[in-house]
Image: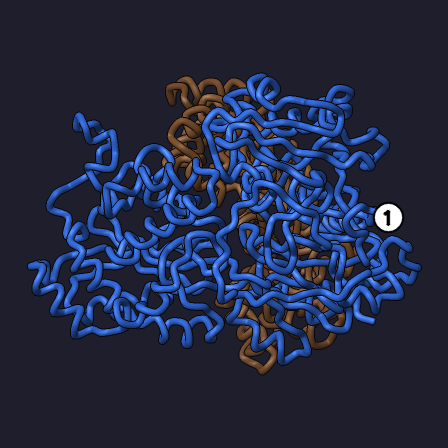
Chain colours: A blue, B brown
């Protein structure tokens, strides 16, 4: 045999060995495994579907909770056979974790929420806070002590014993660990202590079924932070930690959720199995598998071929999906708010940094955006209806004040009534305002970035480029990565002369104000149009009187609305594509960082 | 020969050292990982705390020498994106998947390209040659990710012959991604084989073989191909590099859990330790492959000697 032939033969043999080594039998896509549901799964009441946009704004702050029936899935009444493996094709999370303190709320909600529960849960229909592991809770008058009464019938998975109040300070302490990068690490440190040990001291175990949070700074929405809507606080077994340490969590985390963690293959999948007799809801499928697929055309192909039953697909591919017999379903509540942030609106009177001209005083007196007429002109120049119809297929809801929604405390119905009059598309008026302000033809940089959940961000920015140019603003646009956005613009306070596309989630208005309008370290944009911003924010977050709180929030919203603080565009629901041959009903609120939650309520097609 | 090998090994080590500087620097020039990985709500104090916890607050030269010292021991540090896992463990976990895919792609390239290249040369300026040249044209001009998506659409979605993505379906899982990666190599290899064959077909010893009555198939497949195979053989070292690069987009499209996809995810998240581990592993493979081919080159062709 010649030398070349030998070399080729060796190559072929090696390749064959690698295939055999990595290969296996061809597996069939998951099919329904028929087993009888547990008696406890039976539905007891018909569901109530609230309107996504309630006419009456909610102004009540939860200080004392009353249990509400959440175990009432409508389709559950028709479920006679459990499904087999529910496969959901999803975008791989940036952080792959089983420890919720190691990533954002979005990452934790996807990967941890299935196998562990928070103290306070979220209603799948209206997104309100409802009992989870805590059956009820109350706060003292000044919001410095929050007491939670826990269920006494919960067992950790994998035999790690009973869930008790002792697990709560431990799980809370993990969120503030030195290397924690959870979404709520900052607020938890502010509220409960800077270190694990501090938290253990401040979260007091009253008895096995009662735990009290002693809060360092009075706060009226501690229950919101404790819930999994904003935060990463899921319950982990202290007993497992003491026996196995964090390695034990990595290998086989024990939770108290409706699914039990089975295994994960990084960048490939996460697999959970059904927990029978779960106190809230035992799933209608035997198994849940997140299939991690980065390319959305591939996710769509998986759906079309029945290899997955649910998939995260962007709106531009929905027509194709529907044409193939798939269905688009959307969240009960709006999930994302889309806006343009008007940069450089730093108020020197609002921030302590400017008292002595500190380096983090970002105020520049010659910034055109400090003139309210310029901000109004920007708002008048944008055709929101056209953006909604052309880019979002008309699914968007009106967005009038950044951070505010009719169903959230602090809403003022006046804003919606006056929206057309004050924010309506009027290029002529925009030109006039610019002329009056003396900033006609001023230069602005339009910063565009793609953000999860809104792939239309770039085309929306391109449309806005045209709108702004049309009224005489000298616009240059720049597409940047989110990290660049953060590093080059808002972190060093260089947002002068910029308008930046952004998106936020559905959460109490003060959270948005905290991040965008408030001065100080938590306000990363600091677009404070009025010096009263910080005072009103403090009042809204600290007052336990729901009326005072709502009034403060409303006044804040009035300032933002009347002074054109931002250029809000639209509220959007979260959307998923399902295979109706396999999936019956999926109702989820969508207000939990736009995450796809409440998977235990998904029913198989009957 | 021995001196040459030692010289080439020395060159390779030097290249790797320079590479560590380049990779380390470029990874940090790309930006701060905290801007990607920290939540929106993080304060400057949060950033400072995490930076210290991850060792990113130390002077850059200290970080480099720590990295170099640890890298020599095979330790590239802990992944910033997947806490609790070392960078090298993530690479080694995925390397077999990428290697397997590349192996199948090489088979595809060899099995398809050599016969077409030979036939194209033997049947020069006939319809068969034109078909071969057309395949080469498309092979070299079609982007691998586009080809992958098209094949997925036709053969997985419409015809249902293959799984859409992933590797859990065994041998069938390899077919589409391997063809998508290997198709460019088919074209390149085919053109090389064709041109080498054309040179060889015109030589005196081939004419002599024919005059002596050696059967035509033997002339072509034994005498000609053996001599024409030297140039394509050298190309194999380049193929390995191309396959590794090609794996980046194809693994993304086919959700293949290989090193290429790991590289994309790590780069997007500015996961320095993993980026460094991936790039250095890729380069190590590439350098070793080149070294081996250079040595094998001299072995295969006795006329080639180095001084």
Kindly identify the residue that appears in the image at 62 percent across and 55 percent down. Answer: A596
In the image, residue A386 lies at what x, y percent?
36, 75
Chain at numbered mark 1 = A
Figure quadrant of residue A180: top right
Figure quadrant of residue A208: top right
Figure quadrant of residue A131: top right
Kindly identify the residue that appears in the image at 44 percent across and 21 percent down. Answer: B63
- What residue is pinned by disc 1? A276
Say above or below: A490 vs A54: above
On screen, residue A24 versus residue B109, left or right, reads right
Q: Foreground: B274 or A47?
A: A47
Kindly identify the residue that appears in the image at 19 percent across and 28 percent down. Answer: A355
In the image, residue A177 lies at what x, y percent?
56, 24
Q: Foreground: A147 or A229?
A: A147
Q: SS for tag 1?
A: loop
Q: Foreground: A376 or A89?
A: A376
The C terminus of chain A lies in which quarter of the figure?
bottom right
């Amino acid at each position: 045999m010649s030398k070349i032939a030998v070399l080729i033969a060796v190559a072929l043999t090696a390749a064959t060995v690698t295939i055999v080594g990595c290969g296996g039998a061809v597996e069939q896509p998951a099919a329904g495994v028929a087993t009888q549901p547990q008696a406890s799964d039976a539905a007891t009441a018909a569901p109530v579907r609230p309107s996504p946009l309630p006419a009456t704004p909610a102004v009540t702050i939860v200080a004392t909770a009353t249990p509400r029936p959440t175990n009432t899935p409508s389709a559950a009444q028709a479920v006679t056979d459990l499904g087999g493996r529910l496969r959901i094709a999803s975008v791989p999370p940036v952080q792959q974790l089983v420890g919720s303190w190691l990533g954002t709320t979005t990452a934790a909600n996807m990967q941890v929420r299935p196998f562990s529960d928070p103290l306070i849960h979220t209603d799948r229909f209206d997104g309100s806070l409802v009992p989870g592991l805590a059956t009820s809770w109350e706060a003292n008058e000044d919001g410095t002590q929050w007491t939670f009464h826990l269920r006494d019938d919960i067992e950790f998975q994998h035999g790690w014993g009973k869930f008790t109040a002792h697990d709560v300070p431990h799980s809370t302490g993990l969120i503030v660990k030195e290397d924690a990068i959870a979404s709520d690490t900052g607020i938890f440190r502010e509220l409960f202590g800077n270190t694990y040990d501090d938290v253990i001291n401040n979260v007091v175990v009253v008895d096995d079924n009662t735990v009290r949070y002693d809060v360092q700074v009075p706060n009226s929405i501690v229950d919101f932070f404790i819930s999994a809507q904003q935060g990463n606080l899921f319950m982990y077994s202290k007993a497992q930690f003491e026996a196995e340490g964090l390695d034990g969590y990595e290998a086989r985390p024990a939770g108290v959720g409706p699914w039990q963690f089975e295994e994960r293959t990084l960048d490939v999948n996460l697999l959970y199995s059904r927990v029978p007799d779960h106190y809230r809801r035992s799933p209608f499928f035997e198994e849940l598998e997140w299939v991690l697929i980065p390319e959305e055309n591939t996710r769509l192909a998986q759906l079309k071929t029945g290899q997955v039953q649910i998939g995260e697909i962007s709106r531009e591919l929905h027509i194709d999906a529907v044409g193939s017999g798939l269905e688009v379903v959307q969240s009960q509540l709006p999930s994302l708010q889309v806006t343009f942030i008007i940069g450089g609106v730093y108020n020197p009177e609002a921030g302590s940094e400017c008292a002595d001209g500190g380096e983090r005083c970002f105020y520049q007196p010659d910034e055109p955006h400090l003139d309210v007429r310029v901000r109004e002109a920007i708002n008048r120049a944008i055709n929101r209806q056209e953006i909604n119809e052309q880019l979002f297929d008309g699914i968007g809801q009106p967005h009038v004040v950044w951070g505010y929604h009719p169903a959230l405390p602090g809403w003022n119905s006046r804003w919606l009534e006056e929206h057309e009059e004050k924010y309506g598309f009027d290029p002529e008026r925009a030109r006039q305002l610019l002329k009056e302000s003396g900033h006609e033809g001023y230069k602005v940089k339009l910063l565009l970035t793609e953000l999860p959940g809104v792939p239309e961000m770039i085309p929306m920015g391109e449309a806005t480029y045209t709108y702004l140019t049309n009224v005489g603003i000298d616009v240059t646009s720049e597409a940047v990565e989110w990290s660049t956005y953060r590093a080059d613009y808002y972190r060093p306070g260089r947002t002068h002369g910029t308008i930046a596309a952004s998106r936020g989630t559905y959460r109490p208005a003060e959270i948005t104000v905290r991040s965008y309008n408030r001065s100080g370290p938590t306000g990363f944009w600091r677009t404070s149009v009025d010096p009263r911003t910080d005072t009103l924010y403090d009042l809204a977050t600290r007052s336990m009187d729901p009326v005072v709180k709502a009034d403060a929030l409303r006044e804040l919203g009035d300032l933002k609305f009347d002074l054109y603080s931002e250029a809000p565009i639209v509220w959007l629901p979260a959307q998923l594509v399902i295979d109706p041959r396999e999936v019956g009903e999926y109702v989820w609120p969508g207000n939990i960082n736009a995450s796809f939650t409440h998977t235990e309520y998904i029913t198989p097609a009957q | 020969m021995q001196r040459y090998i030692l010289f080439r090994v020395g060159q390779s080590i030097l290249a790797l050292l320079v590479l560590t500087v380049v990779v380390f620097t470029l990874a940090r020039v790309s930006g701060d990982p905290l801007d990607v990985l920290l939540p929106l709500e993080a304060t400057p104090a949060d950033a400072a705390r995490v930076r210290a916890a991850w060792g990113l607050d130390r002077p850059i030269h200290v970080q480099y020498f720590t990295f170099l010292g640890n890298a020599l021991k095979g330790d590239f540090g802990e992944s910033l994106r997947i806490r609790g896992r070392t960078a090298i463990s993530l690479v080694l976990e995925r390397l077999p998947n990428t290697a397997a895919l590349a192996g199948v792609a090489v088979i595809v390239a060899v099995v398809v390209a050599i016969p077409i290249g030979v036939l194209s040369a033997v049947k020069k300026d006939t319809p068969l040659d034109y078909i071969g040249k057309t395949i080469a044209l498309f092979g070299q001009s079609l982007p691998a990710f586009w080809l992958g998506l098209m094949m997925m659409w036709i053969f997985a979605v419409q015809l249902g012959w293959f799984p859409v993505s992933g590797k859990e379906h065994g041998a069938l899982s390899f077919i589409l991604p391997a063809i998508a990666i290997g198709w460019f190599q088919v074209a390149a290899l085919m053109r090389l084989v064709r041109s080498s064959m054309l040179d060889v077909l015109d030589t005196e010893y081939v004419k002599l073989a024919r005059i002596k009555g050696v059967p035509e198939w033997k002339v072509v497949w034994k005498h000609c191909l053996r001599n024409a195979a030297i140039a394509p053989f050298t190309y194999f070292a380049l193929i390995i590099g191309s396959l590794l690069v090609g794996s980046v987009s194809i693994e993304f499209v086919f959700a293949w859990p290989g090193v290429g996809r790991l590289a994309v995810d790590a780069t997007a998240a500015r996961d320095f330790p993993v980026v460094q581990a991936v790039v250095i592993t890729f380069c190590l493979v590439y350098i070793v492959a080149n070294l081996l081919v250079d040595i094998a080159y001299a072995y295969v062709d006795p006329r080639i000697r180095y001084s």
